[in-house]
Image: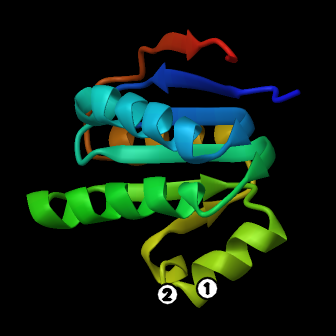
Amino acid sequence: MRNGLYIETIRHLHCTVLRAGGELDHAGRVRFSACLNAVWDWSVGPVLVFDLADLDFYDSSVIGVLAMAMQRMEEEQGSGRIILVRPSDHLLSVLRLTDLLSRVELRESVEETVAELMLDESARGSPSSAHQRFSTPRR
């Protein structure tokens, strides 16, 4: 029995956190891509923080989602950033093999990443963070 995919998004003024858990397969990729498109403009750039550590299973669909985000950022020629938090060794290997690793930033903690981004924004004189949380249930 499949557990499905759980996606949680948290909106900050300076970034959007996308946390996924469960199983990310082709059907999940469609949902995750739609979710990503829905939150694209939540932060300037955008700055997207992906926490995929709770994925129990993923196939090449995870690369598809990340590659789609990278391609869209290039097309829009903005100041977007993709930050991966606690990526598995397997995901790092796949990103390295597909030459995508150089296009993402790696971090150890969502909380530390959000705090770092908030400090960066404060140093530039931007307002402090407010956030909203949205989730999609497992299917």
Q: Residue furthest front?
A: 1
Query: In the picture provided, is 14 more to the left or to the right than 111?
Result: left
Residue contact at pointers 1 and 2, CB within 8 angstroms = yes
Residue under the point 74% across and 33% down: 21
**Which class describes the residues within 10 Å of circle 2: few (<14), some (14-19), or many (20+)?**
few
Disc 1 is placed on an element classified as: helix
Q: Residues within 10 Å of mark 1 (few under 14, many from 20)?
A: few
Please determine whether, in this image, residue 122 is positioned above or below residue 4. Answer: below
- Checking the image for residue 99, the label placed there is 2
Q: Which residue matches tag 1? A: 96
Task: Find residue 19 and report its horizontal and vertical position in percent.
Answer: 63, 34
Number of on-image labels: 2
Q: Determine the image quadrant of residue 42.
A: top left
Which residue is pictured at 46% across the width and 60% down the height? 64
Amino acid type shown at disc 2: Asp
Residue 112 appearing in the image: no
Residue 88, position as x, y percentages in the image: 80, 63
**The C terminus, quarter of image:** top right
Type of amino acid under label 1:
Arg
Q: Is residue 50 left or right of residue 74?
A: right
